[in-house]
Image (spheres, helix red, strand yellow):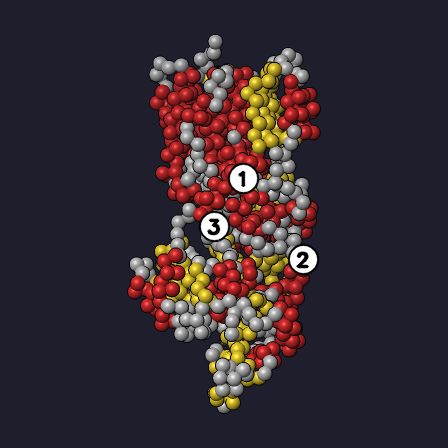
Amino acid sequence: MVHIVTDSTADLPKKVADAYHISVMPLNLHFGEEILKDGEDIWAEEFYHRLSFEATLPTTSQPSPGEFVDLYRRIAKKGDTVVSIHLSEKLSGTINSSRLAGEMLKEEIQVVAVDSSFVTMPLALVVLEAAKAAQAGRELEEILSRIEWTQRNMAFYFTVGSLEHLHRTGRIGKATTLLGNLLSIRPILSIKDGLIVPVEKFRGNSNRLDRRFLDLIRADLGEDPAEVFIIHANAPDEEKRLEETCRERISGVKVFSAIAGPIVGVHTGPGAFGLAALPTS
Amino acid sequence: MSLDYIDGPKLKKLLEAGVETLFEHKEEVDDLNVFPVPDGDTGTNMYLTFQAALREALKAQDDVESILEAAAQGALMGARGNSGVITSQFFRGFAKGVGNTKKMGISEIANGIAGASALAYQAVRKPVEGTMLTVVREAGEKAKSLVGKKIKLEEFLLTVFEHAEVILDKTPEMLPTLKQAGVVDAGGKGILFFFQGVIEGYKGKTLKRKLAEEKPVIKSASNYTEGEVSLVDFAFQYCTEFILQGKNLNVEEIKKDLSPHGDSMLVVGDENTVKIHIHTNNPGLILDYAVRLGDMSEIQINNMVEQSQQRLEKIRQRNEEELPQEVGLVAVVPGEGLHKIYKSLGVAEVIEGGQTMNPSTEDLYKAVTKVPAKQVIILPNNGNVIMTAGQVGELTEIPVAVVPSKTIPQGISALMAFNPHEGLRENLEAMTRAIGNVVTGEVTFAVRNSQYNGFEINEGDIMGLRDGDIVCVGKDSSQVLIDLLKQIVDKEDSFITIYYGHDINENEAQATLAKVQDLFPEADVELYYGGQPLYSYILSVE
């Protein structure tokens, strides 16, 4: 039997994870000396609330190999296979803990650790595709090739309220700076080869930004997306508006959305939002 | 009289001493953290991992094997961050290397360190030299080479430690990221703090601080992020620490009494000696409390706010010393508002000038020489300046290129495409292409009577220009702006930016903005103060 595992930076809503039998390993959130498990001890809403008044800025850390050993043992029986799909190795060492745990369990369970090269919504999409394939009873090879297809075809763009958070936590190159605050310029960012990269500087209001996002997605896919996946770091107004823009401009589009959890929120800061999509086939 | 081996009870004490020393220095280690992700948490994560190992070790039975196994298990479960995960492998490898024994001598410890190194190298998919891996591997090799020599355990430990320190100092030579940031490897430093604590514990603390102080102070890396330092808000300002000696001291009670007065508290020791460390806003209160319990020594009170400011200052200085960037910018711009806007877009030198005030080649040359960059791009922003700008390159030693921008909005479009970390040619291409994305409108007045494009123009008339061509004439600048926009705007959802000039006050400008928004309800319209002379309005449509 093949089990699908990911980590909490996929920002998968719990009911989606449950519906597809996906196990989620939490990363750790540190508020000073206090350590909380993402999605177990603290949730998105509470996190953004705390972020607004906490004096010390939070940091994050990867799960330990021991925690992965426990999780794999809990979900898999001897002879089972676990496909453990995680956020980009260039952003976190989580996958290292997964690999070490797999190494320690190799006599009992086959653990295939997969670097998704993404994080948040695109990671969730990779995981969902893998889970669908696993549910359909596909072999490991087919599941892995589906993962690869998803990675290759992913379209994902986002913006942040301020680049300061990505700078603070070292998740974007120091070179990516935005000077022109006089003209209210916003960065459009993406994830390429596992790293957060600037795509372009954008001027104009939010409606124009939404349309620009859609144009970029269309250009990547070569078609109108049938499904659009919105992710936001406590930016419900942006989420709502972007959703409306999608519905207005793409007839019959299905729009899904999720809130970015604490771990992603630490690095993007509140106000970040963006969207992901895959081609229809 | 110290024993020449380490047994179970001694091992527990040494682990405690090592973790304590790491705790004391964890912020210092955080500061060094630039690899693999410069997020400034290596010290904290290593400490948390060591602490988890220690917690389990202290619960174990008093033989070396049980203690090391418990520590390895604790580290495995409690590993935080990359450095923590590697540390957990050190513990496992060390336990494996030492093997089944009740006490450790030189040979067992050497096997332990070598085992720690071997397992950690296996654990990391692509081991990188110049990190804690290198430090521990070298320590292991040194330790192995000393087995069988006639030396005391203490001398053995010191020799291995000193070698590891030498290697740590070389890490910047092995890993460019470290060298750029001017730091040694954070993880390696963390391991050495632990090791230092162990040795001091073994020697009975007489060595305190000596080892750390023999080395020159390491430059703080500042994690690349000025923001973090400036954002730190200290709830408690004074780091207060001292050693308390007395009779029947109760560690738990001291913790309880002191904990309301601060954070980051550490109270360790036994009934005769207790080490106290706390961040507080009232060091006097803490000392008052302690003086009633016994004698204090090694009292240290540091103002963390001041330290942080000094650090911030150092970072600022370093940022100013930063290497020149690849490509710098010079632009010819009229008006104070537009100067500010151009500066905010990264233009190093802005020269006042425009339609009636064309700067000379010398003016441009002087501006170019002031730019701290290896190559310079000039934005002339006026058809009459392009030729002049083209001559500057013949006078300078560095390459100078001209983006042929004829208007202020063209210059701004070009700046949106500018990337300071790309080369001259890439930027020149991208910026020149970007000029085509924008249509420029200008509203100005006629200085004499004339005929143009079929318009009868009298002195003082207001004219609307589209990319330099007169396309409408009127008596009121606001109305001419509207007429001009009607001709330029070709789609409902255009992006219109208006820069109002020196002769327009803010109220007038806002009233004009409202009219434009009424006329183009679907458009995105932005209004800025340009302060330019002669032109009431400059605008762009995208």
- Residue at (57% x, 32% y) in the render: B303
Q: Is residue B431 above or below residue B139?
A: below
Same chain, labels 3 and 1: no
**Nearest to viewer (mark 3 / mark 1):** 1
What kind of residue is marked 1? Gln
Mark 2: which secondary structure?
A: helix
What kind of residue is marked 2? Pro
Q: Which residue is mark 1?
A: B309
What mark, if any, has residue A174 been given in the picture? 3
- Residue at (50% x, 16% y) in the render: B204
Kindly tell me whether residue B419 is visible in this rendering.
no
Mark 3: which secondary structure?
A: loop
Residue B497 position, x and y percent, is: 56, 70
- Residue at (61% x, 70% y) in the render: B505
- Residue at (66% x, 16% y) in the render: B293
What kind of residue is marked 3? Lys
**Label 3 crowd bin: few (<14), some (14–19), many (20+), radius 10 Å:** few
Alpha-carbon span between mark 3 and mark 2? 29 Å
Alpha-carbon span between mark 3 and mark 1? 22 Å
Residue B18 position, x and y percent, is: 51, 24
Kindly tell me whether residue A193 is visible in this rendering.
yes
**Label 1 crowd bin: few (<14), some (14–19), many (20+), radius 10 Å:** few
**Label 2 crowd bin: few (<14), some (14–19), many (20+), radius 10 Å:** some
Q: Nearer the viewer, residue A190 or A82?
A: A190
Q: Which residue is mark 2?
A: A236
Residue B407 position, x and y percent, is: 46, 72
